[in-house]
Image (cartoon, helix red, strand yellow):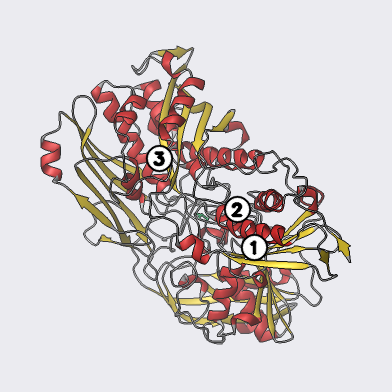
Amino acid sequence: MTTLTTGTSAPPASVGTAHTRVEGRDKVTGAARYAGEIPFADLAHGWLVLSTVARGRIVSVETDAVLEMPGVLTVLHHGNAPRVNGDFISMMGTPPDPASVLFQHDRVPFLGWPVALVVAETSEQAREAAEALVVHYEKEPHDVAFSPGRPDAYPLEGHMPAETEKGDQAAGLADSAVVVDAEYHTPEEHHNPMEPHAATARWDGGRLDVVDSNQGSGWVAGDLAQLFSLDPGSVRVRSEHVGGGFGSKGTRANQVGAVLAATVLQRPVRVVMTRRQMFSLAGYRSPTAQRVRLGADADGRLRALDHSALSQTSSVHEFVEPSAGVARVMYDAEAHRTSNQVVRLDVPTPTWMRAPGEAPGSFALESALDELAEKCGIDPIELRARNEPERGPVSGMPFSTRNLLACFREGAHRFDWADRDPRPRQRREGRWLIGTGTAAASFPSGAMPSTAAVTAEADGTFTVRIAAADIGTGARTALTLVAADALETAPERVRVRIGNSDFGPAMIAGGSMGTRSWSWAVTAAARELRERLIPGTEVPPEGITIRSDTSEAVAALAQKERHSFGAQFAEVAVDVATGEVRVRRMLGIFATGRVVNPLTARNQLAGGMVWGLSMALHEEAVRDAASGGLYGADLAGYHVATHADVPPVEVDWVSDDDPEDPVGIKGVGEIGIVGAAAAVANAVWHATGVRHRSLPIRPDRVL
Ligand code: MOS
């Protein structure tokens, strides 16, 4: 028995102070193991085989020759795989992606659809056999042509209404002194976490045990329980370290394939996606075609706003990239209309990819605002100040906090915006034209129910258990600081264990809601524990554990518009001879609630801004109409910004604590990318006098 003292001499607050990652040393020394490298005795390796046609039917899978190859244990396909149940609604409120419900029928809905899993003693043997496997198809004509104006487009709700409308658009536009009417295009974009999707599954005394790379171990465990008709308590998913995830790391072919094979072979099986496979199996951001119409008085005050967006989904699953949603929060007008539509094509199903909706939507809307500022002869920041809404333009609800203008004020000051000549094509340095641009950013800020357990250990330390995921954001470290403050102890005395579905229901690392949702639950349990531990409390060997469940507290949050906001700034240089655009400087000032760990929050926001740069200038997946697949589906063919493309990126924030959150948090996960591409595009206009409404701004488009 130990006597604990806590709460008697409160240490300085940990939240708000810079902390390197608590698992940082393990990561850089290789001691931290990832899902694809954790050793298991008797491990077998699965290799996925993907369809080579974009639409049709599997006629036969020629397994005989492959089964004779060295080390091959089995070949699973629609003709022999165990039946699974794909008919359920997952934790995220959607059915599972059919591409994850492996080998249940002979239909092929897109190129890159999983048709077989070859399992062998080694990964190399599995790969060789997978590449030798012959599959015969009956081909059907396919359609992968994404373009605006398709008659088969239809409104799709997703997690928000498909369409909103108030006022009279025609009248609003007719009454406007200035009108902008422009179409914007963003290409298909892909996310590639450094660590590919990887899972190892095994049966352990009647329990399914999966080691996996995901954004929510409870999410994947729940899906696997449904898919394999198991009691939820008999599935455990662990994901201690995750090498990135931007929306794609839910339940996918890797986990399901590993479980199928482990069930058939009754031994542990690992399935790792290749980089190429991720381009058809891991979801992506749909291309968008957007039209923005703005009508304003001569002084820039909006009378009409119409933002309509088209994205694509697959023929087997509905997903909408809700680009027009951003207009429902940013700007008001008497006549206000937004619409999100999709077309179904013979392509893989898109998915959530960092700031789904807001990332492409803000490119269109914030570019249009810049065009309006130009037409009105008003500074782009002043234009936004004149159009700050009092309430949510569509919801009519008050904002919990909205510090957008504070971000612009601080950003303008640091970026020397007051010295800017608003006219385009005024600054030249040798062969470079120089310009600056700005754009606004926003992203929803919410909390989701979570559970946590906090234990006072007999040795005077504390253990936190929560099924959170640290996808590289520093979540484990943030929760350590949050728990330390709630316990009134030092972070060194707190051990945070995450990434284990046995720890109970919790929000995923997604929607920019992870840290906030988990911190709420950790704080609730830790505060109650601290109150329990009055001086002199005897702690038994098994410790004293307090559990929390924030379901009721989160549900009781007042109905408000809850969003983080930000102001993006970019300076570019454009080579008029080659069409090359170099971003020379980026600045982002954000209002994202209380910042838990300035070190990792800055990292998160800067990462998003770099992605925005990449989106503006580099990223573009090109679909081949003839085959239905992508050209160059790898990181050689799909260009992303590299170190040499990235200038100094300055990130800071204004004070913006959420008064209704126990820690004051709002969320930094996704807002960094929002508005960043528009800031770059607006800077390119300022440099050259030419508007770029299609991304990426490639050299051939600049010339
Ligand atoms: Mo994010 S797109 O919510 O993983």
Image quarter of the C terminus: top left
Q: Earlier in the sequence, mark 2 or mark 3?
A: 2
209 vs 523: above or below:
below
Q: Earlier in the sequence, mark 1 or mark 3?
A: 1
Tell us which disc is closer to us: 2 or 3: 2
Seen from the viewer's position, the closer of residues 407 and 11 is: 11
Q: Position of residue 322 (x, y in %)?
A: 36, 54
The amino acid on which the numbered mark 1 sits, given as a three-letter code, is: Ser
The residue tagged 2 is 193
The amino acid on which the numbered mark 2 sits, given as a three-letter code, is: Pro
Tell us which disc is closer to us: 1 or 2: 1
Would you say the residues marked 1 and 2 are in contact, meaning their CB atoms lie under 8 Å apart? yes
The residue tagged 3 is 695
Task: Tell me if residue 251 can be seen.
Answer: yes
For ligand 1, tell me if the residue under mark 3 lies within 8 Å. Answer: no
Residue at disc 3, secondary structure? loop
Q: Earlier in the sequence, mark 1 or mark 2?
A: 2
Label placed on residue 221 = none
Q: Position of residue 173 (x, y in %)?
A: 14, 38
Left or right of 350 in this view: 492: right
- Residue drawn at 57 percent across, 87 percent down: 82
Q: Quadrant of residue 9?
A: top right
370 vs 21: above or below:
above
Q: CA distance from mark 2 to mark 3?
A: 22 Å
The residue tagged 1 is 213
The amino acid on which the numbered mark 3 sits, given as a three-letter code, is: Leu
